[in-house]
Amino acid sequence: MSRATTDICDEHPEAQVCDAGLAAFGGRPAFSGTISTLKVFEDNTLVRDAVGQPGEGRVLVVDGGGSLRCALLGGNLAVAAAENGWAGVVVNGAVRDADEIDAQPIGVRALATHPRRSVKGLHSGQAGLPVVFAGVVFREGEWLCADRDGVVVLPSAPGTDA
Protein backbone atom coordinates (compact mmCIF):
# COMPACT_ATOMS: atom_id res chain seq x y z
CA MET A 1 0.00 0.00 0.00
CA SER A 2 1.21 3.51 -0.76
CA ARG A 3 2.17 5.92 1.99
CA ALA A 4 0.21 9.15 2.30
CA THR A 5 1.77 12.01 0.36
CA THR A 6 1.03 14.32 3.29
CA ASP A 7 3.09 12.13 5.63
CA ILE A 8 5.90 11.92 3.09
CA CYS A 9 6.00 15.70 2.75
CA ASP A 10 6.03 16.13 6.55
CA GLU A 11 8.87 13.64 6.95
CA HIS A 12 10.81 14.71 3.84
CA PRO A 13 10.69 18.47 3.26
CA GLU A 14 13.13 17.93 0.37
CA ALA A 15 10.49 15.96 -1.57
CA GLN A 16 9.51 17.39 -4.94
CA VAL A 17 5.77 18.06 -5.09
CA CYS A 18 3.85 18.39 -8.36
CA ASP A 19 1.96 21.59 -8.98
CA ALA A 20 -1.81 21.25 -8.76
CA GLY A 21 -3.60 20.39 -11.98
CA LEU A 22 -3.16 16.65 -12.52
CA ALA A 23 -6.57 14.97 -12.55
CA ALA A 24 -6.99 11.48 -11.08
CA PHE A 25 -8.20 8.52 -13.15
CA GLY A 26 -8.04 4.76 -12.73
CA GLY A 27 -9.32 2.34 -10.15
CA ARG A 28 -6.38 2.87 -7.80
CA PRO A 29 -6.53 6.36 -6.25
CA ALA A 30 -3.19 5.87 -4.47
CA PHE A 31 -0.10 4.31 -6.03
CA SER A 32 3.67 4.44 -5.85
CA GLY A 33 6.71 2.97 -7.51
CA THR A 34 10.01 3.49 -9.22
CA ILE A 35 9.84 5.92 -12.14
CA SER A 36 10.33 5.07 -15.81
CA THR A 37 10.24 8.08 -18.15
CA LEU A 38 9.15 8.82 -21.70
CA LYS A 39 9.23 12.05 -23.68
CA VAL A 40 6.75 12.05 -26.57
CA PHE A 41 4.58 14.50 -28.48
CA GLU A 42 1.13 13.59 -29.85
CA ASP A 43 2.33 10.05 -30.67
CA ASN A 44 1.81 7.29 -28.10
CA THR A 45 3.86 4.57 -29.83
CA LEU A 46 6.45 4.52 -27.02
CA VAL A 47 3.66 4.52 -24.41
CA ARG A 48 2.12 1.44 -26.05
CA ASP A 49 5.53 -0.24 -26.15
CA ALA A 50 6.24 0.54 -22.49
CA VAL A 51 2.92 -0.65 -21.04
CA GLY A 52 3.25 -3.83 -23.11
CA GLN A 53 6.38 -4.72 -21.11
CA PRO A 54 6.52 -5.96 -17.50
CA GLY A 55 5.95 -2.97 -15.23
CA GLU A 56 7.20 -4.64 -12.05
CA GLY A 57 5.29 -2.12 -9.93
CA ARG A 58 6.87 0.89 -11.62
CA VAL A 59 5.21 4.20 -12.51
CA LEU A 60 5.42 5.34 -16.12
CA VAL A 61 5.90 9.12 -16.34
CA VAL A 62 5.04 10.44 -19.80
CA ASP A 63 5.97 13.99 -20.76
CA GLY A 64 3.64 14.71 -23.65
CA GLY A 65 4.67 18.35 -23.77
CA GLY A 66 1.37 19.36 -22.17
CA SER A 67 -0.47 18.89 -25.46
CA LEU A 68 -4.23 18.59 -25.07
CA ARG A 69 -4.90 18.02 -28.80
CA CYS A 70 -5.00 14.21 -28.49
CA ALA A 71 -4.79 11.46 -25.88
CA LEU A 72 -1.61 9.56 -25.08
CA LEU A 73 -3.29 6.88 -22.94
CA GLY A 74 -6.68 5.24 -23.40
CA GLY A 75 -8.64 2.26 -22.20
CA ASN A 76 -6.71 -0.38 -24.15
CA LEU A 77 -3.35 0.87 -22.92
CA ALA A 78 -4.65 1.11 -19.36
CA VAL A 79 -5.69 -2.56 -19.58
CA ALA A 80 -2.21 -3.47 -20.87
CA ALA A 81 -0.54 -1.46 -18.10
CA ALA A 82 -2.64 -3.13 -15.41
CA GLU A 83 -2.15 -6.62 -16.86
CA ASN A 84 1.61 -6.08 -17.08
CA GLY A 85 2.02 -4.92 -13.51
CA TRP A 86 2.45 -1.16 -13.79
CA ALA A 87 1.44 0.67 -10.61
CA GLY A 88 0.47 3.83 -12.43
CA VAL A 89 0.93 6.27 -15.29
CA VAL A 90 1.42 10.03 -14.99
CA VAL A 91 0.80 11.96 -18.22
CA ASN A 92 1.73 15.55 -19.00
CA GLY A 93 -1.04 15.54 -21.58
CA ALA A 94 -4.46 14.04 -22.13
CA VAL A 95 -6.06 10.62 -21.74
CA ARG A 96 -9.25 9.20 -23.24
CA ASP A 97 -11.72 6.43 -22.43
CA ALA A 98 -11.91 7.74 -18.86
CA ASP A 99 -14.56 5.21 -17.81
CA GLU A 100 -12.46 2.33 -19.15
CA ILE A 101 -9.36 3.65 -17.37
CA ASP A 102 -11.37 3.97 -14.15
CA ALA A 103 -12.31 0.28 -14.41
CA GLN A 104 -8.65 -0.80 -14.28
CA PRO A 105 -6.65 -1.50 -11.09
CA ILE A 106 -4.09 1.16 -11.92
CA GLY A 107 -3.53 4.78 -10.94
CA VAL A 108 -3.44 7.47 -13.61
CA ARG A 109 -2.81 11.21 -13.42
CA ALA A 110 -3.20 13.46 -16.44
CA LEU A 111 -3.96 17.07 -17.34
CA ALA A 112 -7.33 16.36 -18.98
CA THR A 113 -9.33 14.09 -21.25
CA HIS A 114 -9.59 14.35 -25.03
CA PRO A 115 -11.48 11.99 -27.34
CA ARG A 116 -8.99 12.06 -30.22
CA ARG A 117 -6.29 9.37 -30.36
CA SER A 118 -2.69 10.16 -31.11
CA VAL A 119 -1.21 9.72 -34.58
CA LYS A 120 1.32 6.91 -34.78
CA GLY A 121 4.63 7.81 -36.40
CA LEU A 122 3.92 11.54 -36.22
CA HIS A 123 6.84 12.34 -33.92
CA SER A 124 9.76 10.49 -32.42
CA GLY A 125 10.21 10.15 -28.69
CA GLN A 126 12.81 9.22 -26.12
CA ALA A 127 12.86 6.91 -23.13
CA GLY A 128 14.86 7.09 -19.93
CA LEU A 129 15.66 10.81 -19.94
CA PRO A 130 14.81 13.20 -17.10
CA VAL A 131 11.55 15.00 -17.91
CA VAL A 132 10.30 18.23 -16.37
CA PHE A 133 6.68 19.27 -15.86
CA ALA A 134 4.32 20.32 -13.05
CA GLY A 135 7.28 21.92 -11.28
CA VAL A 136 9.10 18.59 -10.84
CA VAL A 137 12.10 16.88 -12.44
CA PHE A 138 11.20 13.19 -12.94
CA ARG A 139 14.27 10.97 -13.20
CA GLU A 140 14.41 7.34 -14.24
CA GLY A 141 14.84 5.18 -11.13
CA GLU A 142 13.57 7.74 -8.60
CA TRP A 143 10.40 7.08 -6.59
CA LEU A 144 6.93 8.57 -7.07
CA CYS A 145 3.94 8.43 -4.75
CA ALA A 146 0.47 9.69 -5.67
CA ASP A 147 -2.81 9.90 -3.80
CA ARG A 148 -5.82 12.21 -3.63
CA ASP A 149 -3.67 14.93 -2.03
CA GLY A 150 -1.05 15.08 -4.77
CA VAL A 151 2.06 13.61 -6.35
CA VAL A 152 5.49 13.60 -4.70
CA VAL A 153 8.90 12.45 -5.89
CA LEU A 154 11.94 11.39 -3.86
CA PRO A 155 15.31 9.99 -4.97
CA SER A 156 14.27 6.63 -3.43
CA ALA A 157 11.38 5.13 -1.51
CA PRO A 158 11.33 6.26 2.13
CA GLY A 159 13.09 3.75 4.35
CA THR A 160 15.41 2.53 1.58
CA ASP A 161 19.01 3.47 0.93
CA ALA A 162 19.59 5.17 -2.41
Image: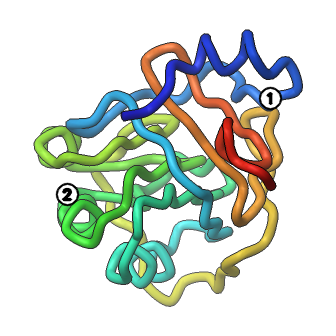
Q: Position of residue 55 (x, y in %)?
A: 40, 70
Q: Residue 22 appears at what percent x and percent y?
A: 53, 29
- The quarter holding residue 61 reads bottom right
Residues tagged 2 and 1 counted as in contact (Cβ below 8 A):
no
Of the pair 97 and 19, the residue shown nearer to us:
19
Q: Position of residue 20 (x, y in %)?
A: 63, 19
Which amino acid, by three-letter code, is at mark 2? Answer: Gly
Q: Dot 2 corresponds to which residue?
A: 75
* Residue at the spot 60% in from the left edge and 66% down from the top edge: 36
Q: Helix or strand or loop: what does disc 1 sit on?
A: loop
Label 2 SS: helix
Is residue 138 rendered to the left or right of residue 100?
Answer: right
**Which amino acid lies under the numbered mark 1 shown in the image of this protein?**
Ala
Disc assigned to residue 15? 1
Q: CA distance from mark 2 to mark 1?
A: 31 Å
In terms of depth relative to the viewer, which is nearer, 125 or 139? 139
Instruction: Tell me if mark 1 has few (under 14), some (14-19) or many (20+) residues whose alpha carbon lies within 10 angstroms of its own.
Output: some
